[in-house]
């Protein structure tokens, strides 16, 4: 069982910044990809950004140039630095991690989600 705990959400004015953190704990052998998704009221959950264990990143077009994802593999933690926030960034942000809980990795894959953290951007 792998648990993800997010922190760092809150209320900020448009143009402001927030930094989200997400730490994974439990039985973990390796974490391949970690990422952030968001869900606004009445909308489907969408990808915000992902990062692999080697540091390769992927961003939604809507956040490119404003958000930066990073991770600390020694702490099983992923971060999302959000700058130049817009009201349309308002959503619940969810952390995601995929990996293996133990060897053999192929037989012990996991995909876990955090409980979500609210980000509200006022205009």
Image (spheres, helix red, strand yellow):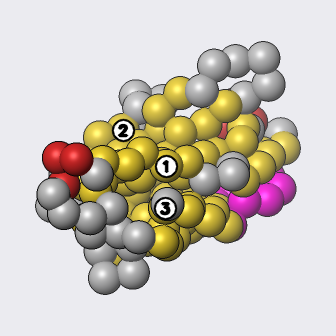
- Report the label total: 3
* Residue indicated by mark 2: 59
* Residue 74 at x, y percent in the picture: 31, 82
SS at mark 2? strand
SS at mark 3? strand
* Residue 118 at x, y percent in the picture: 77, 49
User: For the residue carrying disc 2, how many other residues have a C-alpha within 10 Å: few (<14), some (14-19), or many (20+)?
Assistant: some
Picture quadrant of residue 61: top left
- The boundaries of the magenta stretch are 8-17
Viewer-nearest of discs 1 and 2: 1
Picture quadrant of residue 73: bottom left
- Which badge, 2 or 3, comes first in the chain's sequence? 3
Q: CA distance from mark 1 to mark 3?
A: 6 Å
Q: CA distance from mark 1 to mark 2?
A: 20 Å
SS at mark 1? strand
User: For the residue carrying disc 3, how many other residues have a C-alpha within 10 Å: few (<14), some (14-19), or many (20+)?
Assistant: some
Residue 44 versus residue 26: which sits nearer the camera? 26
Q: Which mark is residue 52?
A: none
Viewer-nearest of discs 2 and 3: 3
User: For the residue carrying disc 1, how many other residues have a C-alpha within 10 Å: few (<14), some (14-19), or many (20+)?
Assistant: some
**Is 63 placed left or right of 13 in the picture?**
left
Q: CA distance from mark 2 to mark 3?
A: 24 Å
* Residue indicated by mark 1: 112
Residue 12 seen from this side = no
**Is 110 placed left or right of 41 in the picture?**
left
Residue 96 seen from this side = yes
Residue 44 versus residue 25: which sits nearer the camera? 25
- Which badge, 1 or 3, comes first in the chain's sequence? 3
């Amino acid at each position: 069982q792998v648990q993800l705990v997010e922190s760092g959400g809150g209320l900020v004015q448009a143009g402001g910044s927030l930094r989200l953190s997400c730490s994974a704990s439990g039985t973990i052998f390796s974490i391949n990809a970690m990422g952030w998704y968001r869900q606004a009221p009445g909308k489907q959950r969408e990808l915000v950004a992902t990062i692999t264990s080697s540091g390769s990143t992927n961003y939604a077009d809507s956040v490119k140039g404003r958000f930066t994802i990073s991770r600390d593999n020694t702490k099983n933690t992923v971060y999302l630095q959000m700058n130049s926030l817009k009201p349309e960034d308002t959503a619940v942000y969810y952390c995601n991690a995929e990996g293996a809980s133990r060897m053999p990795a192929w037989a012990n894959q996991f995909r876990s989600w955090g409980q979500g953290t609210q980000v509200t951007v006022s205009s």
